[in-house]
Every structure is written in structure tokens, then in C-alpha cells.
Image (spheres, rainbow, N blue to C red):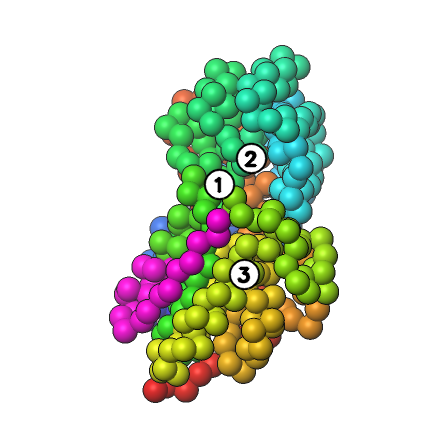
Amino acid sequence: MAKKKYPEVYRLLKEQIQAGRFAAAGRLPGETALLAECGVSKVTLRKAICDLEREGLVHAIPGLGTLLGRRSKASRPAPSAHRRIGALFPPAPSAFALQILGSVKEFCDLFDLELLTEATAPKVETDPGRVAALCEKGLDGLLVFYREGFDGAFMDAVGATRKPCVLVDNFPPAPALDAVMSDNHAAGRELARYFLKLGHRRFFYLNDTDAHLLSTRERLEGFRWELGAAGGTSLAVRTIDRSRQASGPSPGARSFDPELTDALHHPTLLTMEYVRTEWKKAPARQRPTAFIGQNEEAILAILHALRRTGLAIPAQVSVGGIDQLSHPIPGLQPTHLEQDGRALGRHACERLVLRMRQADAPISRLLVPMRLVLGDTDRAIPAP
């Protein structure tokens, strides 16, 4: 059977649900059966099911499977002695972290769980005390959001609580802790496939220096892997130097995004330097036709640099990236892979509840698919 693409699997399952094929069972078949029937990868199938869940056609319950219909009070798990959970989140949470936290609050409201929240300290070295203080409030489980600069002491403090715990987003694998995070490697591969289908074969990739970030490594690795599988491609990678970011506003930056002037200073100049010293001097057939940003900061820097160097988007070069886009960009909507904060929060809560009930359940690392958002910054190019 020929492999179906994601939209085809999504439409097939939606049509079958609406036609009543699964009505008698009240749920979708198991993942193994669906994979065999649809002939797709787990990532593709899970992405289709996530979108069906977003529409309210199905909902997942740990231990029960994927049930038909929107989640309701009737689908609540049986009463449990475990009623209080904590959420430890960054001191200055991003819009994405707040989206996850909002989903966690909705889950707790739905299942009558008491939620206690605590922000980590401005300085990571004081975080272990925050972890201990939160757990002293009689928690039955703990969700720990990723924060920049976490270290071994922070992770030791989390492990020392001896509470059921789930790590949320970006943490490297921890042998004794469950984790729920975005599938960054798959996102890198999907973005590369999208641009390859448009005919692009030469790319510029603006990377982040945060080498400890799992997302940084996996997005670039996934992108490279897909290009390697395609063959006949080239990739120019430049890396943001965070130590140079606050060196002052770049000329004209405030007309683009005054709130991000300092943060965009170095990545913008880095991209401009590449365009002026390498891109414009290279023969036309050797120039990258697509510029890729590893995160929102990189995407914004690329767009700003291309405007300042006079390259037309998408007439001369296409632009894409991976991340939430929380800052509006005048006149442009970049094509990008977007993380699903609501799904991350929901799956993290489901995993935590399961861990609270079954302390001996196998440790798991759940990867949540991202969603491709099409914009107006890319175009197909003719074959050479």
C-alpha cells in the first residue's frame, strides 16, 4: 500500500469518524492497527490525531485509548486520593510557556485537581530551594517546565523530591523522570521536506548558540538529515553569539520591532554580513534560495536583515523557521513549524496522573508533533 501523506490520513480518519465507522467501539483502533491500515509513520499518524483532538472529534485518556468526541466530565478518571499537583515554571515565562500552563489549568479544572504554581528563581542556583518549598505544600505530583540555565543541582533537587514528576519541554533525557516535549527532530525534517518539495536545494540556516538546548541540536540535526536523504543539497550554517547581543541597537532596528532591538542586534548583523560578503558575490546558481531560522529570534533577524540588504521576500529568497511567532511582523507571515503548547500541557498532566496512580509504570518520553503554518514568505522555484 502506498504511503499516505498527513492531510490524507487526517481526512480519512475524519470521514470515518463522521460516517460512524468507530461508533460501536466508541474509540479509534489502537495505534498499531492504524499504522498498518494507513501505512504511515507514527509521527504522521499522531499529528493527524492531534488535529482531530483539536477539533473535538476525539480525545485521549491514558489507559483507555483515543475516545470519540470532545473530552467531558463523563470521561473523567475514577476518583483518586491524589488531588494536588504543582507546576514549577520559568520566572519570566514566554507566551509558549503560558500556553502550556493554561492547558494545565484547564486539565486540573476538568478533573478536580488542585493546582499550585511557583515560578523558579531569577538565579538558577537558588532554584533547589524553590523546588523543596513547593513540594512541602503536600503535593502528590509535580510538573517542571524547562528554564534557561538549569544545571545538575536543579535536576538533583527535582529528583530528591521523590514525588511523581514530569519534565515539560526541552529537557535532555533523564533516566528516572518522565518527559513530554515537542518533536524537534521531526520538525526539522518536515520543514526541510516542505522546502525541498518547492524546489529549493541550497539553504542558509541561522542557528542558536545554546548548545545545551535539546531543541537547538535536534532541529538542525533533523533538517540536515532530510537534506542528506534528498542528496544534491547545500547548507550554510551561521551561529548566533549571545555574548554579542546586547552591544547596542542596530541602525533602523526600531522601525522593525522596537521591543527586540537588543536581542536582534547580533543575529541581524550576522545575517547581513553573510548576504553582503557571500550571498551577493556567489554565482546565481550557488546562492541559497531559502533562509531558515532555528527559532523566533532567528526568523525575525533574517527578515530584518533581508529587508535591510534589499533582498525581496519571496521573489528572491524564501524564509521559514521553527518556533512560536509571538511578535507580529508588519506585512509578512512567515511559514513555520509551530509547537502545540496546549497538547504539551494536556499530555504532561495525563502522564503525571498515570504516574501518581502507577508508580511502577515505565518511564516515558512523549514527543508531540508540531504544526506546519503556511505563510507568504516562500515560493516554488523552477528546476535548474
**Camera-nearest label, 1 or 2:** 2
According to the image, label 1 marks what residue? 170
Q: Position of residue 24 (x, y in %)?
A: 52, 53
Give the magenta part as a residue range.
223-241
Q: Are marks 3 and 2 in contact (CB under 8 Å)?
A: no
User: Gap between marks 1 and 2, in whole Å?
Assistant: 9 Å
Can the viewer see residue 231?
yes
Q: Is residue 236 magenta?
A: yes
For the residues marked 3 and 2, what is the alpha-carbon distance in whole angstroms? 27 Å
Sooner in the amino-acid sequence: mark 1 or mark 3? 1
The kind of residue on which mark 3 rests is: Leu
Q: Which residue was labeled with disc 2?
A: 147
Percent x, y of residue 355: 49, 27
Q: Is residue 38 above or below residue 346?
A: below
Residue 72 image-quadrant placement: top right
User: Is residue 21 shown above or below 138?
Assistant: below
Residue type at the position of mark 2? Arg
Between 253 and 294, the one lying in front of the other is 253
Q: Which of the two discs, 1 and 2, labels the residue nearer the N terminus?
A: 2
User: Measuring 39% from the left and 35% from the top, which residue is drawn there?
Assistant: 173
Quadrant (top left/top right/bottom left/bottom right) for the C terminus: bottom left
**Where's residue 350, x and y in %?**
55, 36
The quadrant of the image that shows the N terminus is bottom left
| Disc number placed over residue 269 in the picture, else none | 3
